[in-house]
Structure formats: C-alpha cells, structure tokens
Amino acid sequence: MEEIKLCIELIAGVLSAAISVAFDIYVGYRLAEIKLTGYRDRIFAFGLCILAILMAMQGRWETNAASVVELILFTWYYRKYGLVKVSGAFMVGLLIDFLYDLIIVFLQRIPNISELMLSLCTLGLSIVYYPLCILLIKHFRQWLLQRLEDQCRKIFWSLLAYSFCSLMVVNLINVFLDEAKPSVIVYSYLSIGQAAFIWIVYYTLRRAEDARFKAQLHQQKQKELEEYANYLEQSEDNLRAFRHDYRNLLNSLKVSAAEGNVQELLDKLERYSAENLDSQALLKYKDTNHI
C-alpha cells in the first residue's frame, strides 16, 4: 500500500513539474515571438524541459534554482531576438509559476492533509491553473508585446525583474515557514504587497502618459486642420474667380494654338500656374481629404 502511495505521489509530482516547465517554455516562445524552425531549436527546448523537470523534482530549493537556470539558458540561446524581450517574456511565465507556488504553500498549511492528498491536489490545480493562465496570456498577448517592445520596455522589464526576485525570495522563505519568525512572515507579505503596488503605479502612470500623448496628437492634428481651413478661406476669392480666368485663358490658348505660337502658349500656362496655384500648399496638404 505504501509503495502504491509513493508511486502515485511520484507520478503526480512529475506531471505537475512537467506542466509547470512546459508552461514556462510556452510563454517564453509565445511572447518573444520565437518559432521552433530547426532541429537544434527542438533539441534545445526538449533538453531544457528535461533539465528543469529533473531539478524541480528534487525539492523546493531546486525548483527555484530550476527557474533561474531556465531563464538564463533561454535568454542566452535566443539572445539574438533581444535580451530585454526574451528575458522579459520568460519572466512572465516564471512569475505565474511563483504565484502557483504560493497557492501550494497555503494548501500545505491545511491541517492533517496527507502527502498523497497534497500531491493529488497539486496535480489537479496544475491541470486547472495553467490552462486558465494560457487563456489569459493569449488575451493579453498584444498588450504584453507592446510593453516589451515600446520605448519604455526597460522600465517594464525592471518591474518584471523586481517582481521575479521578490517572489522568488518569498518562495524560498516559505521553505522554512514552519521555523520562520513572525517578522519574516510579515516581510514576505510586504514583499508581495510592494510588488503589486509598483505594478498599480506603473499601470496608472502609463495610462496617464498614453492619455497625454493622445491629447498632443489630437492637438497637432487639429492645428493642421485649422491651418488648412485658413488656407482655403484665404484662397476663396481666387477659387471663385477661377471660372472667369479659365474662360479667358482658354480663349487665349485657342488663339495662340491657331497662330501656331507654341512657346507663347506654354508661357501663358506657366504664368497662370505661378500666379494662381500654390504648389507648396498643395504638396503640404496632399494627404488631407476631409475637414
């Protein structure tokens, strides 16, 4: 009976670790926009999965070490896609992993829960938790890609790195939570709260910056439209007189053409264009269709 329990615990542990590692690598490839195009990439991805699973099965310390090793190897191998983008994409998956580990910590605090039940609960949670996270990643993929590629990408990466380090420290502290002093426990929750707070501040500042940029863009567009409208108003008299000028010019061109004076005809066209058509204004507003 004990052997069956140990076997079930081992299988549940392996499956949970495999799901977690596969999710990390999936998020890394997905957000970094990397495709497995050759056998080398496939061998690397498979080897990284096996290495991380073997490390994660050894214990909680090794799980955190596996996360760091995954991050370093993945970033180094795909560094040509950009260090900030690749490492930031992979850290998103690791952060979701750390949140999963915190949930497991709470499960471990349930009184009188057996190792077998804990292993089954961990596996069941993995099966539900990670598919939901994949749906969230797909939903927010464009938003995350923009943050990893825009001018403020280093700030976004710094927040990811800070949250990664904070949650990893909290995860390591939870290894010794039974022996930890209340001050250490308080520090853990403060670290989580601080990481959440800086993300709220970042989101608020980005919304304000986006709103300011849109307002400036709108003002610039409005200024161009007002300038174009003023140009049309100033040219209104010339436009109204165009029909009269056109008739006179047409009669003059007919006479010149009948007399065979081609040069005089060309000179009149050039002179009329210079006096009545503002070529610079036409080029300036060539993309404006409506006011």
Image (cartoon, rainbow, N blue to C red):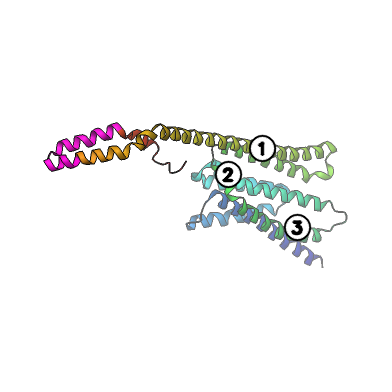
Please, what is the dominant secondary structure of the magenta stretch? helix
Question: Of label 3 and label 2, which has the lower sequence position?
Answer: 2
Residue displayed at 81% across by 65% down: 2
Residue displayed at 56% across by 52% down: 30
Residues under labels 2 and 1: Cα distance? 24 Å
User: Image height check: is 85 above or below 222?
Assistant: below
Magenta segment:
253-275
Residues under labels 3 and 1: Cα distance? 35 Å
Residue displayed at 60% across by 37% down: 211
Tag 1: amino acid = Thr
Q: Are marks 2 and 1 in contact (CB under 8 Å)?
A: no
> What SS does tag 1 mark?
helix
User: Which residue is identified by label 2?
Assistant: 87
User: Which residue is identified by label 1?
Assistant: 204
> What SS does tag 2 mark?
helix
Binning the other alpha carbons within 10 Å of mark 2 as few (below 14), some (14 to 19) or many (20 upward) gives many
In the rendered structure, find residue 122 and report the number of the disc placed on it. 3
Q: Is residue 210 left or right of residue 60?
A: left
Q: Nearer the viewer, residue 207 or 257?
A: 257
Question: Residue 284 appears at what percent x and percent y?
Answer: 39, 36
Q: Is residue 66 left or right of residue 125?
A: left
Marks 2, 1: nearer the viewer: 1
Q: Is residue 17 visible?
A: no
Tag 3: amino acid = Thr
The quadrant in which the N terminus is found is bottom right
